[in-house]
Image: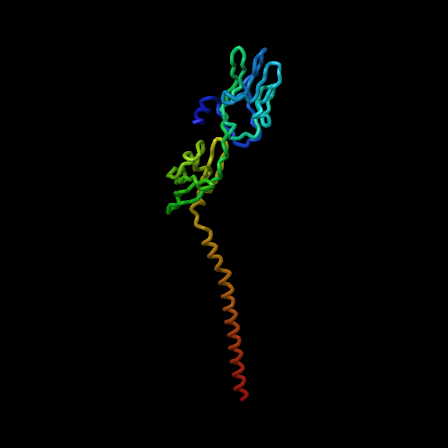
Amino acid sequence: MIFISLLSAGTPVFVQTGKKVLRLDVKEPVVLKEADLFTWNVNGRANVVRLVHGGKPIISKNYKSRAEFSAQNHSLLLKNVQKGDSGVYRALVSGDKDIPFITLALLLADPVSGVKLTVKLCSSDSTKVTVICSTEDSLINSTFTCDTQTCSHEGGERAEIITPGASLDVYLENGSVICNHSNQVSSKTDSQKIEDLCVKPVASKGSQNNVTPIVVPIVVSLVVLAVTGGFIYHRRRKQSKLSLHLN
């Protein structure tokens, strides 16, 4: 695989795709003698830039619009790097003999997608919780069981199988369960306090509270009707007594 060959070829440099500017530096000052040629090349074939002793740097037409070279420190500046820029970059001087100054394995990677932490199961005493850590597209997920001390993986589709270099993990930190999706260039997390994971839905409390606005008006109406009915009853009774007395 290219991943293995690049790592074995030079110092790995992981870079996120679309990075606006990436500077590749040589390890030590470069001194060119007469007839010496300095180059930055990719994979030992394509030259990005060439500089002959006493001359001006020449940038390859494939990199003309997105590469800059410093004749002072011999650094190479790449712009808006993409996956196609992955490769082994070498800075060397060719003359009586080749003198390599640095070899870098440049590896471009896309940022990882976001993640979501969801509860699958809580123990009866709420001391253990089983959670699912999944990516935003739900194509990758892993199941973990956590207690107050640790989280252990139970199953699910591991991220490494789908995306080389990426991982999907769950761990505890400062009383929270952390769901983490990461690779060499980026990381996304979702977290929740462990004591909140097994709390019963608030909706049950809300439904009880919603009863109050309904019950109170009914009770008040009944009281008003009772008082009004009693008043009318006593008034009619008084009128009846007064009518009998007059007769």
Q: Is residue 204 above or below residue 96?
A: below
Q: Is residue 210 above or below residue 237?
A: above
Please say which color scheme the image uses.
rainbow
Q: Is residue 228 left or right of residue 129?
A: right
Q: Is residue 75 above or below residue 228?
A: above
Q: Nearer the viewer, residue 54 or 153?
A: 54
Instruction: Please give the name of the residue rendered at 52% of the width and 72% of the height, measured from the top-left corner.
Output: 227
Query: Which of the 4 image quadrants contains residue 117?
Result: top left
Quadrant where the N terminus sits is top left
Query: Which of the 4 image quadrants contains residue 140?
Result: top left
Instruction: Please give the name of the residue rendered at 52% of the width and 14% of the height, measured from the top-left corner.
Output: 99
Q: Nearer the viewer, residue 36 or 136?
A: 36
Which percent across, then down, holds residue 225?
51, 71
Furthest-bottom residue in this view = 247
Furthest-front residue in this view = 61
Which percent across, then down, holds residue 51?
59, 17
Q: Nearer the viewer, residue 239 or 219?
A: 219
